[in-house]
């Protein structure tokens, strides 16, 4: 059921995108990654720029 409602939501989102838009030129995998990112934003699953910089400094 969850997958069906997700597909319906994606179709609704895509219906509002002009046919000349880049969205129609990217792969399904790229679209899925963007959708996951948008869901992360909605669920406040974010990492600040400062936190990322701290992690990167550990590797350098």
Image: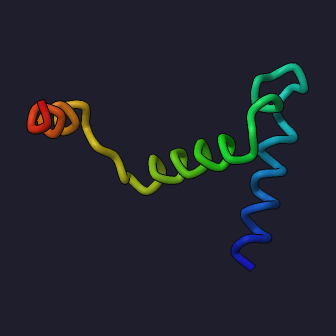
Q: Quadrant of the N terminus?
A: bottom right
Which residue lies most toward the right here? 19
Which residue lies most toward the front here? 60
Residue sitting nearer the eye, 32 or 43: 32
Which residue lies most toward the top here? 20
Asked if 9 appears above or below 60 in the picture, the reply is: below
Q: Is residue 35 left or right of residue 24?
A: left
* x and y percentages locating residue 36 in the rendered image: 55, 51
Residue at 75% across / 39% down in the picture? Answer: 27
Q: Quadrant of the C terminus?
A: top left
User: How many marks do you count on the picture?
Assistant: 0
Residue 16 appears in which quarter of the rendering?
top right
Residue at 76% across / 68% down in the picture? Answer: 5
Residue at 54% across / 46% down in the picture? Answer: 38
Asked if 22 appears above or below 52 in the picture, the reply is: above
* x and y percentages locating residue 9 in the rendered image: 76, 56
Residue sitting nearer the eye, 12 or 3: 3
Which residue lies most toward the bottom here? 1
Q: Is residue 58 left or right of residue 26?
A: left
* x and y percentages locating residue 45 in the rendered image: 37, 53
Residue at 90% across / 26% down in the picture? Answer: 19
Residue sitting nearer the eye, 34 or 45: 34
Asked if 25 appears above or below 39 in the picture, the reply is: above
Q: How is the image coloured?
A: rainbow
């Amino acid at each position: 059921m969850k997958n069906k409602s997700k597909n319906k939501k994606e179709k609704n989102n895509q219906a509002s995108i002009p046919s000349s838009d880049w969205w129609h030129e990217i792969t399904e995998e790229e679209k899925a990654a963007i959708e996951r990112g948008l869901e992360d934003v909605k669920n406040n699953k974010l990492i600040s720029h400062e936190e990322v910089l701290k992690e990167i400094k550990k590797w350098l």
